[in-house]
Structure formats: structure tokens, C-alpha cells
Image (tube, rainbow, N blue to C red):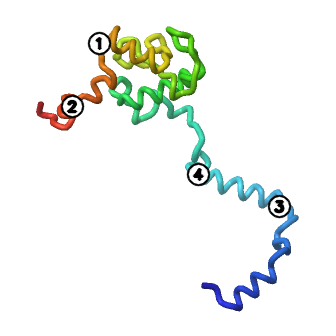
């Protein structure tokens, strides 16, 4: 809790410009600031894309061993949002929750030829009829969960 003295001081400062408002930086000071940024390159790159460390060049790249979720993020980032394309079967358009990137053979490669956009209804029908997978796929079955928990099975 601030003291009465602090409150009076803050009250006296209200509405007045700060001491450095309107001051221009000298060229020497600008150079000094620039040099300090170069000494800390990690802060410079924070939040920016680094082309030298993307995809296969990244030391954490897993290639075909990447998870189901990671592959879908890769597809969305490299091929665009699913909502930007119409459904391959019914030509319907919708939001990203209504449109899905579907894999041709469920091998989840990073090849664009193996991927196409389907609406939710057509995606379920495609998985049921063409691939023989029930809604939710193998990932939701009790056997799959049991197998993934027990590595000895």
C-alpha cells in the first residue's frame, strides 16, 4: 500500500509530460543501441521465422516419424487452410471446423498429392466406405489406447 507522501507525489505528476518527451536521440546513441541489439541475437530473432532452421534443416525434424497432430499442422501451414478449398466430392465450402484435410491412404506423408479437402460428412463417408474405418478411426478405439499404454503388447 503506497504511503500518503507517494500518493501526493504521483498526483503532482498527473497530466505533465515525461522528462524525455520530444528529445531526439543522437547518432552516436542510435549506433550504441544498434550494437547492443547485435550482441543479443536471440532477442532479435524472438518470434521471427528463421529460414535456415526450418523443415529438414531443423535439428528436431522427425520426418516421417512425426506425430499425427504434427503432420496435420505441417499440412495446414504448407498447403493452406482447409477452409480455403471446396470439398472434393460435394464442392461445399465452410469454416476450418467444417472442412478437413483428408489423407488419401492414411499413411500421412508430406506429399501434397496424397492430401485433399473434404467436408465433415464426406470425410466420414470416405473413411467408412473407402478405407473401412469407423468414426474416430483407430485412435479412439479401446484396443488402440490399451496398446499405446502397454509397450510390451
Q: Are marks 4 and 1 in contact (CB under 8 Å)?
A: no
Task: Say whether disc 1 or disc 3 marks the residue closer to the N-terminus.
Answer: 3
Task: Say whether disc 4 or disc 2 marks the residue closer to the N-terminus.
Answer: 4
Q: How many marks?
A: 4
Q: Which residue is located at x 43 percent, y 12 percent?
A: 114
Secondary structure at numbered mark 1: loop
Q: Which residue is located at x 39 percent, y 18 percent?
A: 124
Q: Which class describes the residues within 10 Å of circle 1: few (<14), some (14-19), or many (20+)? A: few
Task: Say whether disc 4 or disc 1 marks the residue closer to the N-terminus.
Answer: 4
Compared with 90, 78 (above or below) is below
The x and y percentages for residue 108 are 38, 19
Per the image, the residue denoted by label 3 is 25
The x and y percentages for residue 39 are 61, 54
In the foreground, 9 or 122 = 122
Secondary structure at numbered mark 2: helix
Q: Which class describes the residues within 10 Å of circle 4: few (<14), some (14-19), or many (20+)? A: few
Tell me the tag on residue 142.
2
Compared with 4, 68 (above or below) is above
Q: CA distance from mark 4 to mark 2?
A: 46 Å
Q: Are marks 3 and 2 in contact (CB under 8 Å)?
A: no
Tell me the tag on residue 132.
1
Q: Quadrant of residue 19?
A: bottom right
Per the image, the residue denoted by label 4 is 43
- Camera-near label (3 vs 2) is 2
Task: Say whether disc 3 or disc 4 marks the residue closer to the N-terminus.
Answer: 3
Secondary structure at numbered mark 4: helix
In the foreground, 68 or 65 = 68
- Residue 147 vs residue 140: left or right? left
In the foreground, 139 or 107 = 139
Amino acid at each position: 500500500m503506497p504511503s500518503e507522501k507517494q500518493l501526493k507525489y504521483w498526483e503532482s505528476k498527473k497530466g505533465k509530460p515525461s522528462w524525455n518527451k520530444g528529445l531526439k536521440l543522437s547518432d552516436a546513441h542510435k549506433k550504441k543501441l544498434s550494437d547492443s541489439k547485435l550482441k543479443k541475437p536471440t532477442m532479435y530473432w524472438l518470434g521471427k521465422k528463421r529460414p535456415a532452421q526450418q523443415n529438414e534443416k531443423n535439428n528436431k525434424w522427425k520426418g516421417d516419424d512425426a506425430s499425427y497432430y504434427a503432420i496435420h499442422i505441417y499440412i495446414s501451414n504448407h498447403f493452406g487452410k482447409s477452409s480455403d478449398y471446396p470439398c472434393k466430392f460435394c464442392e461445399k465450402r465452410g469454416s476450418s471446423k467444417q472442412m478437413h484435410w483428408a489423407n488419401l491412404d492414411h499413411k500421412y506423408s508430406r506429399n501434397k498429392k496424397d492430401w485433399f479437402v473434404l467436408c465433415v460428412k464426406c470425410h466420414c463417408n470416405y473413411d467408412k466406405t473407402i478405407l473401412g474405418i469407423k468414426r474416430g478411426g483407430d485412435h479412439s478405439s479401446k484396443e488402440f489406447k490399451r496398446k499405446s499404454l502397454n509397450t510390451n503388447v
